[in-house]
Image: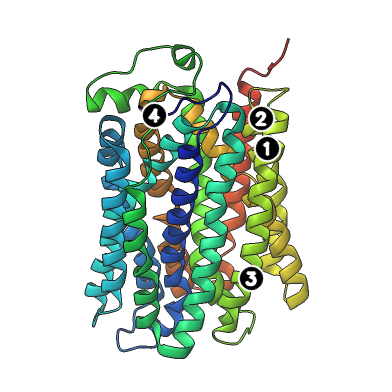
Amino acid sequence: MAASTAPGRVPNSAWLALVVLTLINLLNYLDRYVVPAVQESIKHSAINPTDAQLGFLASAFLIVYMLTAPVAGVLGDQSARPRLIAVGVALWSLATAAAGLAQHYPALLAARASVGIGEAAYGTIAPALLADAFPERLRARVFAIFYMAIPVGSALGYVIGGAVDHAHGWRAAFFVAGAPGLVLALLALWIRDPQRGANDPAPAASTSAPVPSAWLGTYESFFSNGPYVRTVLGYAAYTFAIGGIAVWMPSFMERVRGFPHGVASMQLGYVLVGTGFAGTMIGGWVTDYLRRYTKQADLWLSGVTMLAAAPLAYAALRASDHQTFWALLSATELLIFMSTGPINVAIVSEVPPTARAAAMALSIFSIHILGDVPSPPLIGFLSDHGSLEQAVLVIPVAVLVSGAIWTYAAISGPQARRP
């Protein structure tokens, strides 16, 4: 018989789940950001892709990711979640290593696209599992720790990818990124799967209708959920901007601002890990504090910080002086990453506990098909037919749109938290 847990005390199994899932999330983003770190080397290799083809490497992965995410989401609401996570991590790790073996563009494209199958099983399920493992009073901070892996993993992708590329070539970078996932897949099997809605004192109060049993019905119910729809639409604009920054910033720094090859990705990684860590943690803690006063704390924090980031993003991309560029880019990233944890808390809080993985799956599908699937190839297309310096200016526009949608969503929702 399992040991009982004192009321209000979080069991050790929940903290173990947070540690393992955060490490997996870190590797998830390390894998993604190896590609922009080495893409200039790929461009000048025998594969010789265009900028539009380079941009589509990220989009192909995301297309497969978003197409398989809805199935993974429903399975995550009905099956043993740790096993699904373990299988997903193992699959994406093998696909990442396979990219290092590609001899032509179609093979590289197929390897990167296959990564999406494995990541869908993880990305839809992990947030739902954590929401069930921790009480609402801790969720923003827990999600801040979990999503802190985005900037840290992204930074490691830039740094490790750039360093390995410089020392051993771009193919070796994919081998290094793929290997650790097989170990983490085994660790995922040790995670305890908490009961759905175990930490929601009144599950029925979180939705106005019962969760349909049919797969199609489950997803149809989300479209009539106004707060969920507005949150996801803002997230799509956010993801459009993040996708453009992630894929094209190293190339922008080298081609347009004259940073040495290899140095750009590593310096960007160092800045990303600092601003991402600080922004994500600050956003989580501030949101939990604001939650005492408003039910819309997650959306208020996310909307206001994105509105503040938009003009800074534009100024950073227009700055020609390197010091000014770094100062403005750092401030922009700090503000952008403050919404990382809160906006995902908003998504899982706007649906029934028994449909959280499905809600994350539909969110993943939507933010990618509207966000970072079109943005990298669009910026690449604009670069091929104009200049990269002008093409990247679509990014601040997307930041502004995201902030406007989330702020409107915060205004339109119920505000009072305490009598």
Please name whichever residue, 37 or 405, is drawn nearer the observer in this view of the structure: 37
Query: Which amino acid type is marked by label 1?
Result: Leu
Numbered mark located on residue 301 in the image: 1
Direction from residue 180 to residue 91 in the image, left or right: left
Vertical placement of 3 versus 213: above or below?
below
Callout 1 secondary element: helix
* Front disc: 3 or 4: 4
Q: Residue at x 26, y 59 (%)?
A: 91
Residue 22: where, in percent of width, then height?
Answer: 49, 51
Residue hosting label 2: 297
Residue hosting label 4: 2
**Coloring applied to the structure:** rainbow
Residue hosting label 3: 270
What separation in Å lies between label 2 and label 4 (alpha carbons)?
Answer: 36 Å
* Front disc: 2 or 4: 4
What separation in Å lies between label 2 and label 1 (alpha carbons)?
Answer: 6 Å
Q: Earlier in the sequence, mark 3 or mark 2?
A: 3
Q: Are marks 2 and 1 in contact (CB under 8 Å)?
A: yes
* Front disc: 4 or 1: 4
Question: Does the rendering let one see residue 387?
Answer: no
Vertical placement of 196 versus 22: above or below?
above
